[in-house]
Amino acid sequence: MRRPGGVAAGRAVTVRDVWKALDDEFPFAHRADWDNVGILLGDPGAPAKRVVIALDATPAVVAACRRHRAGLLVTHHPVIYSPLKSIRTDQAASATVHELVRMGTAVISAHTNADVAPKGVSHALARRIGLKGIRPLIPGEPSDACKVVVFVPADRAAEVLAALSEAGGGRIGAYTRCSFQAVGTGTFLPAQGAKPFLGKPGSEERVEEVRLESVVAGSLLKGALKGVREAHPYEEPAIDVYPLKGGALGGGIGVVGDRERAAPLAEVLADVHRSVRPSWIKVAGPRQRRVARIAVVAGSGSEFAEAARAAGADLFLTADIKYHQALEAAAGDMVVADIGHGSGEKWILPEFRRVIAARFGRRVATRVVMESEPMRPFRPKQTGGWER
């Protein structure tokens, strides 16, 4: 007997099970090639009865893991980003890793894969501020995707596609088992000593074959080719691999959507402030502007301002705006608003919780930690001091 989510009744939910649930909605293979995502710490087979979900593995989040006896921490930002040359308690870069290992808490990090998923980080923020008709700002994810082409007898094409899909291939956004198949004629002449699936050595064969094409993330290519070869009936299957520049495997970068009604900029920013509760909103661009269409790139997205402008956005919400970018926005006709890196991204955390709860129900207890920006604004009062 199995419960919803495919985990057998009586068996504890594991770290790997939670990873699989997240992978189904935010495919880990659809990550930037510089990123570090997946199960980054701990035993994949360890129980995950209690899960803490946070943006980063900060000291406060680690304390929450200890307090709630969490076997798993799910973060958006990778707990290990750059290679560690040592793991010591007196070095900030590795002290958190040391403590989590000591506690026996595994870590799954879902970063750029969650950014580009069809209902990922920017989509969560756009829903939070009430946008309608949400669609990708830049469709597809520039990635290390490849096109795999394999020639296979028609009656074995389904088996080969199944093996490719099982290895993570054939996945585009919310769609799986994506392929194109065309029928043609394959020819081959087996040499003496060969063991052909069809025909015999020394006799040229002409066989109806299917040209089966599908996309595979570069990080999954090795496993996908192994699965294809194992499922293929031929002794020497013909397989081509083509790198795809700007391959579209994810849902896209950022989103754009529309308000139910246009409103003055000040009113729209007040609505954003109430919905998102950012530590700040810094604005560049025209002061008097009615806003109907909003482009969103949660986190660092300042380089996508031109795409937002091309999409007809009146307002571009993102973070980490640099000085020269603010100058460009100030001289333009589109308002650019910096709401803080973490303030925009943290709304994906309840989505992580939703995915886990939908798969495992009460078998896994989840707790979301929503922290404020590490940077905080200072506004001097008459008596001096930090404004709270």
Image (spheres, rainbow, N blue to C red):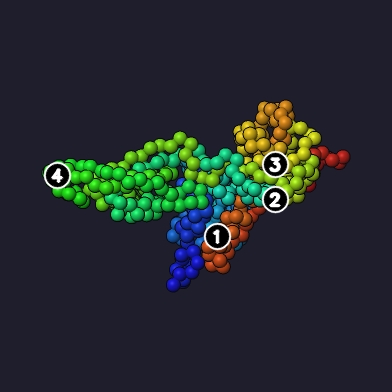
Q: Nearer the viewer, residue 294 or 46?
A: 294
Identify the residue under disc 4: 203
Q: What residue appears at the point 35 percent right and 54 percent down from the top-left corner?
A: 158
Identify the residue under disc 3: 293
Q: What residue appears at the point 62 percent right and 55 percent down from the top-left corner?
A: 350
Pointer 3 local density, CA inside 10 Å: few below 14, some 14–19, many at least 20: many
Q: Position of residue 72 (x, y in %)?
A: 53, 57
Label 3 secondary element: strand
- Dot in front, 3 or 4: 4
Q: Position of residue 255 (x, y in %)?
A: 62, 43
- Dot in front, 2 or 3: 3
Q: Is residue 54 visible?
A: yes
Q: Is residue 320 above or below residue 109?
A: above
Q: Position of residue 356 (x, y in %)?
A: 55, 60
Q: Is residue 184 above or below residue 45?
A: above
Of callouts 1 and 3, the N-terminal one: 3
Instruction: Tell me if 38 is positioned left or right of 209 in this view.
Output: right
Of callouts 3 and 4, the N-terminal one: 4
